[in-house]
Image (cartoon, helix red, strand yellow):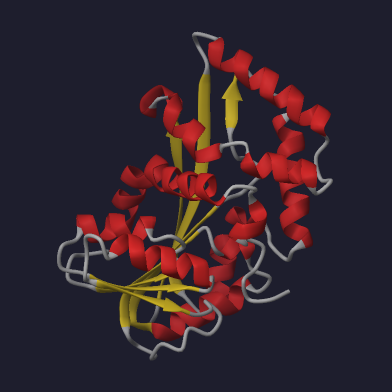
């Protein structure tokens, strides 16, 4: 298992363009609530910020839009995603720098940053505690680090209920765990932050609901790429995926339907 962990964009989905669109929609789905929490946890304009595992730069973009006086160092281990983020962000911004590197060994100077954000990264790592330790090292004393992750015991929930979604999430967990990830890490975040040396830890769950945001944002943030890959890799049967597709269609047709998804956020401070 290498430092890239269980998320490798060229393998996780069969279509790079669709996967990039999904990642962007996933940021949009939660951004308003995430932003509130980042501010509550101490993020202020003018701070020095590091984002670990920036991917294509979609969250970086949101931060640059919202805070006109922050400078962001964005660290990403995947060369393709580094280039994508650099090209995407440079169209509008100069207050950032994308660095190709590992969250386990960033090469950044210690005591350098006021605020760190790590979004949907720890769940893909075989050694999340050491990642937290590295982030703790590069924070200034008093600096804050926020970690956002999934817990696939509770991912998309629907009304009317779709029982086969359980099979999909179990298959996803088996696939990522076989690669060294932990898709159920959300519940473990406070303990991992503590083990990594952070203090004054807090924990939040944020939710997105189709009755408030509409269905389209959920459709864009999910997609068929990953489930299809699970079938291809033998973790999910094509019969199960077919049932999910039919029941999902029927659920959406129901006038009283609802789609809900959660993310888990933990913050810690460097003393």
Q: Is residue 40 visible?
A: no
Q: Is residue 265 above or below residue 46?
A: above
**In the rendered view, does 105 fall on the left or right side of 209?**
right
Q: Quadrant of residue 114?
A: bottom left
Residue drawn at x 27%, y 65% is: 90
Q: In which quadrant of the rendered image does the C terminus lie?
A: bottom left
**In the rendered view, does 6 fall on the left or right side of 262?**
right
Q: Quadrant of residue 115?
A: bottom left
The one nearer the camera, 44 or 89, is 89
List x then y, in percent, for residue 9: 59, 58
**In the rendered view, does 128 fall on the left or right side of 110?**
right
In this rendering, the count of numbered labels is: 0
List x then y, in percent, for residue 61: 30, 58
Q: Is residue 131 above or below residue 221?
A: below
Residue drawn at x 75%, y 59% is: 177
The one nearer the camera, 15 or 211, is 15
List x then y, in percent, for residue 228: 71, 40
Residue drawn at x 65%, y 68% is: 5
Residue drawn at x 49%, y 8% is: 255
């Amino acid at each position: 298992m290498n430092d890239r962990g269980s998320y490798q964009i060229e393998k996780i989905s069969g279509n790079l363009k669709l996967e990039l669109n999904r990642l962007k929609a996933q940021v949009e789905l939660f951004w308003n609530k995430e932003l509130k929490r980042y501010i509550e946890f101490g993020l202020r304009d003018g701070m020095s910020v590091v984002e670990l595992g920036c991917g294509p730069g979609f969250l970086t973009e949101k931060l640059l839009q919202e805070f006109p006086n922050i400078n962001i160092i964005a660290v990403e281990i995947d060369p393709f995603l580094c280039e994508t983020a650099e090209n995407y962000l440079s169209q509008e911004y100069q207050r950032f720098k994308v660095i190709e590197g590992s969250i386990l060994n960033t090469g950044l100077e210690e005591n350098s940053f006021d605020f760190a954000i790590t979004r949907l990264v720890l769940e893909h790592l075989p050694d999340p505690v050491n990642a937290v330790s590295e982030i703790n090292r590069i924070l200034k004393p008093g600096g804050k680090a926020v970690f956002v992750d999934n817990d696939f015991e509770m991912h998309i929930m629907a009304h009317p209920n779709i029982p086969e979604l359980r099979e999909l999430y179990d298959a996803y967990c088996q696939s990522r765990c076989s690669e060294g990830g932990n898709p159920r890490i959300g519940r473990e975040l406070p303990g991992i932050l503590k083990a990594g040396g952070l203090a004054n830890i807090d924990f939040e769950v944020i939710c997105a609901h189709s009755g408030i945001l509409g269905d389209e944002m959920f459709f864009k943030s999910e997609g068929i790429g990953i489930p299809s890959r699970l079938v291809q890799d033998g973790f999910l049967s094509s019969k199960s995926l077919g049932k999910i597709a039919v029941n999902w269609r029927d659920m959406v047709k129901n006038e009283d339907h609802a789609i809900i998804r959660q993310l888990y956020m933990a913050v810690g401070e460097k003393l």
